[in-house]
Amino acid sequence: MAIFDKKYRFTSNRHSQKGLMALVFGMISLISFFIATTVSVRTSAAMVDRMAGAGMFAFIFGTVGLMLGVSAIKEPDVFPILPKLGFAVALIAVLLWFAVLYLGVALG
């Protein structure tokens, strides 16, 4: 019968607030990375001090996003997509910022 072909799953899971915040912080850090590198390349590094300040601020945002993502992954009874996505975005952002910081120290 057509009525019994549909499969429904009732669950008490909810979306994680920490996972959402990890995703937001990771996206802020990632967008800041692309804006800062674009501005730095287009101005031939004329605003190095401002971009460095923005970079450190965004690096902190990414690190907080990583911590929130790890905390959200460990929460019970939550849908796993937001915590995992938030953790992944924040990890990519932190790795990109770390690479820029490392290259700045190694080459500078």
Image (tube, rainbow, N blue to C red):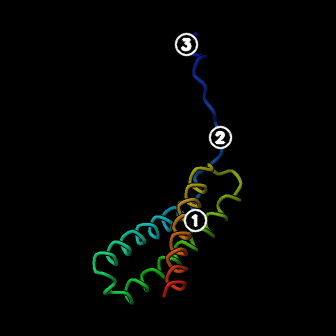
Look at discs 1 and 2 and give the one toward the viewer: 1
Amino acid under label 3?
A: Ala
CA separation in Å, label 1 and label 2: 30 Å
Q: Which mark is residue 91?
A: 1
Residue under label 3: 2
Amino acid under label 1?
A: Leu
Residue 4 is left or right of residue 55, and the answer is right
Residue under label 2: 11
| Crowd around label 2: few <14 · some 14–19 · many ≥20 (10 Å) | few
Task: Tell which of 52 and 21 is nearer to you.
Answer: 52
| Crowd around label 1: few <14 · some 14–19 · many ≥20 (10 Å) | many
Q: Is residue 72 above or below residue 7?
A: below
Amino acid under label 2?
A: Thr
Task: Tell which of 75 and 30 is nearer to you.
Answer: 30
Estimate the x, y position of residue 7 in percent, counting from the top left. 61, 25
**At x 28% / y 80%, what residue is drawn?**
43
Q: Secondary structure at mark 3?
A: loop
Q: Please report whichever mark, 1 or 2, sits nearer to the chain's N-terminal start.
A: 2
